[in-house]
Amino acid sequence: MFEVRDESEPDGEAVMESKGKASRERKTSRKQLLEKKKAIDEIMKAASSPNKDDLASFPAFCHYQRNGLSVYLVSGYGNKLSSPLKLYIQNLLKANMEGPYGSEWPIEEKVKRREMVAPEARYIFVHEEPNANGNQAISVETERASTDVIRGRGPIVGFVHYRFTVEEEIPVLYVYELQLEPHVQRKGLGKFLMQLIELIAHKNQMGAVVLTVQKENFFAMNFYMSKLSRYMVSTISPSRVDPLIGLEKSYEILCKAFDHEAKATLQAGTWV
């Protein structure tokens, strides 16, 4: 008797080969994921190294002398802030952000105070050159930070708070705050600081710069999306995750991606 083989039935060897191929693909995929995770971990570890001075790599950006301003930059760390610095940050945040946050400010202020002193928080403090302001009136925020003058530093007139973190498996530099006092605004300093931030991001192999902006802060929205180049509403912003949820939220998340993967993940389908 001859066995009649149903040609519609899959060949046993073919099935085994197919299963073997699928297994190899899963192993390869898992290996690639593990390698990617390891690479991200190494990038984040190097970027977040304690006491690493990000300004040291960019000496040309440590001073800004344009449009009547003469300032210099100093690095700082969230877990090493002095009491006067903490008070300065709190006061400047309130002065600049209480309006845009409106009724949300009391809760948000508490959040910002916790974020301010986190070990992963990194700072760039902007100091005026001693006596650079001449007879100009000193703000309350600057006066409260006048202890820096005693240490040989000019008064602080602003700061950037940033962190190295991961969004959607992309290492990013996240700008938590860019705050300047009124008398040093609209003089190119903000753009200068963001150029420095982008250089720091590149230097540390970050795929993008990401930041959050209150919708009511029209000046900031215009600054990032018009005055600077290529900052867009990110795919992780509430308005892009779900337009209905976006309507309920008071903020947008903007980003500027530097490589193909970051653009595909954080900017896909966005517009300027």
Image (cartoon, rainbow, N blue to C red):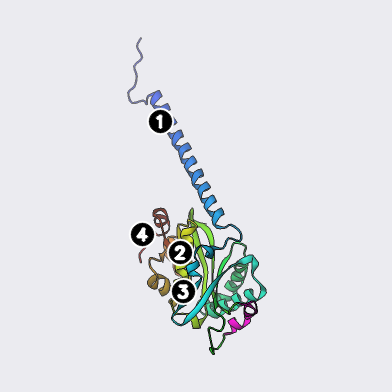
| Residue type at tag 3 | Gly
Q: Nearer the viewer, residue 46 or 220?
A: 46
Q: Nearer the viewer, mark 3 or mark 1?
A: 3
Sequence order check, earlier mark of 3 and 2: 3
Q: Position of residue 203 (x, y in %)?
A: 48, 58
- Report the amino acid beneath label 2: Glu
Q: Determine the secondary structure under disc 1.
A: helix
Q: Which residue is mark 3?
A: 190
Earlier residue among tags 3 and 1: 1
107 horizontally vs 17: left or right: right
Q: Is residue 31 above or below residue 156?
A: above
- Disc marking residue 226: none
Q: Quick check: can you spot residue 216?
A: no
The residue carrying mark 4 is 269
Name the residue type under label 4: Gly
Say few, some or many: other residues with alpha carbon within 10 Å of mark 3 (under 14 / 14 to 19 / 20 or more): many
Q: Is residue 123 visible?
A: yes
Per the image, is 150 magenta? yes
User: Where 50 sits versus 193, above or below?
Assistant: above
The numbered dot on residue 198 is: 2
What is the distance, in whole Å, between disc 3 and disc 2 at their CAs?
12 Å
Q: In front: mark 1 or mark 2?
A: 2
Residue situated in front as seen by the camera: 227 or 167:
227
Q: Residue furthest right?
A: 83
From the top left corner, tell me how far across and down residue 245 is, in percent.
46, 65
Per the image, label 2 sits on a secondary structure element best described as helix
Residue range in magenta is: 139-152
Q: Are marks 3 and 2 in contact (CB under 8 Å)?
A: no
